[in-house]
Image: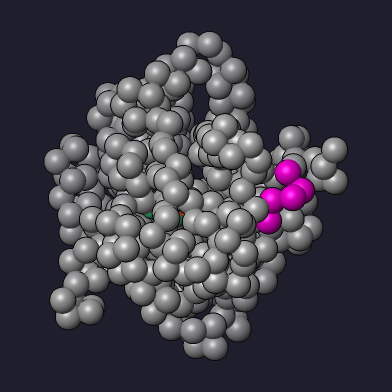
Amino acid sequence: MSKFDFAPMPDTDGFFGNYGGQILPPELIKVMNDINQAYEEICKTEAFQNELMQLNQDYVGRPSPIYHAKRLSDKLGGAQIFLKREDLNHTGAHKINHCLGEALLAKFMGKKKVIAETGAGQHGVALATACALVGIPCEIHMGQVDIEKEHPNVTKMKILGCKLVPVTRGTATLKDAVDSAFEEYLKNPDEFIYAIGSVVGPHPFPKMVRDFQSIIGREARQQFNDRHGKNPDIITACVGGGSNAIGLFTAFLNDDEVKIVGVEPAGLGLDTDKHSATMTLGKPSQIHGMKCYVLETEDGEPMPVHSIASGLDYPGVGPQHCYLKDIKRVEYDSVTDDECLSAFMTLSQVEGIIPALESAHAVAWAMRVAPTLDKDKTILINLSGRGDKDADYVAEKLGL
Ligand SMILES: *Cc1c(COP(=O)(O)O)cnc(C)c1O
């Protein structure tokens, strides 16, 4: 028996302990509750489950393998490092897992348009892909700063037939894109659906996105046990909004022997104002329709956050992570931009795997910890995505 019992989370109001909920005007609470009801009905039907299962297999390429990074483990001289290869999914990251779910849900609900924000462009590409597959119009809002940094993803979204809306307000990054996309959604919430890109926003999104992503941990737990007859000692993943992390963690939450660590971006350092370590330095507050830890300025505005990985620079974080931190089931640590870059290059040159800068945060944390552990210990990293999108940026940054 585990001392934790996570099955019933969140409660019927969408709370994980003190976090989550629906911090919205009453008319929007009704819209969200309709989505929740449709989701609860539809996701239990055999038609929905079979279609999603088949697409996960034939279209995404699931199950994604677990790879033993032997050369990296040997080089570090400590714990054995394993990678859950979400980078091998169609579209190159874990985001396709929830995008397929959300696009299918939109179809089953008869919606006319899917709207979303994107940071690094990964959610945009994954959603545009899923909408092309399902046959629903798609509109993506993206910060101008990110548009310039993530050119290949911008091109892909256009090719995939979605409408791309550049956002120039504020810092012109992820948070501003969320605001802009939400405004468009509010124009007609009956016919549109908002497809949030992580386990954030009002209930039921943190629950739905988690459910769609939790296939990562279900597969990983089975695969690791089939191969080794036990669970990994440590599992870890990077945390932006927290979807790839909760996707891996969920299946292991009741396995008390497994240490679980989420890794946040410390950017230029936790003692500067250029980071995005929400769980480490944020305070309980609210943002984008939910209660969660938030990085705020002295006058209570969301802080302009920074990470070398666009997909991680968000001043809020998924409510379930906040709860898991408070009850001490999951630990949250951080790595800097420099450590991330170094891990990015090391994994590329020692294993021939170019990771996304986001995922390289989790790799960097494992590289820091592995040498302090015995060789029979195991660390499973969720390699949330591949680094093709970051290659030019890194080359320029390092003068390659
Ligand atoms: C978007 C993204 C992330 C961050 O989002 P989470 O919701 O925290 O998982 C991490 N890795 C990759 C590859 C991404 O594209």
Residue at horizontal 41%, vertical 62%?
72
**On the picture, is 127 further left or further right than 256?**
left
Residue at horizontal 22%, vertical 69%?
393
Q: Quadrant of the N terminus?
A: top right
Q: Is 145 rendered above or below residue 120?
A: below
Give the number of marks. Answer: 0
Res 346 visible: yes
Res 176 visible: no
Q: Is 335 rendered above or below residue 181?
A: below
Q: What secondary structure do most residues of the magenta stretch adopt?
A: loop
- Which picture quadrant has residue 259? bottom right
**On the picture, is 253 further left or further right than 241?**
right
Residue at horizontal 58%, vertical 61%?
375
Residue 126 in the image: x percent, y percent? 32, 41
Q: Is 255 rendered above or below residue 357?
A: above
Q: Is 66 rendered above or below residue 131?
A: below
Residue 178 in the image: x percent, y percent? 42, 55
Q: Give the magenta part as a residue range.
A: 255-259
Residue 44 in the image: x percent, y percent? 59, 17
243 or 395: nearer the eye? 395
Q: Is residue 80 magenta?
A: no
Residue that lies at the very extreme toward the bottom in this rendered image: 271
54 or 229: nearer the eye? 229
Check the image and tell me how it is coloured.
Answer: one colour
- Which picture quadrant has residue 136? top left
Residue at horizontal 74%, vertical 42%?
254
295 or 86: nearer the eye? 86
Q: Is residue 258 magenta?
A: yes
Q: Quadrant of ligand 1?
A: bottom left
Residue 109 in the image: x percent, y percent? 46, 21
Q: Quadrant of the C terminus?
A: bottom left
Residue that lies at the very extreme toward the top in this rendered image: 46
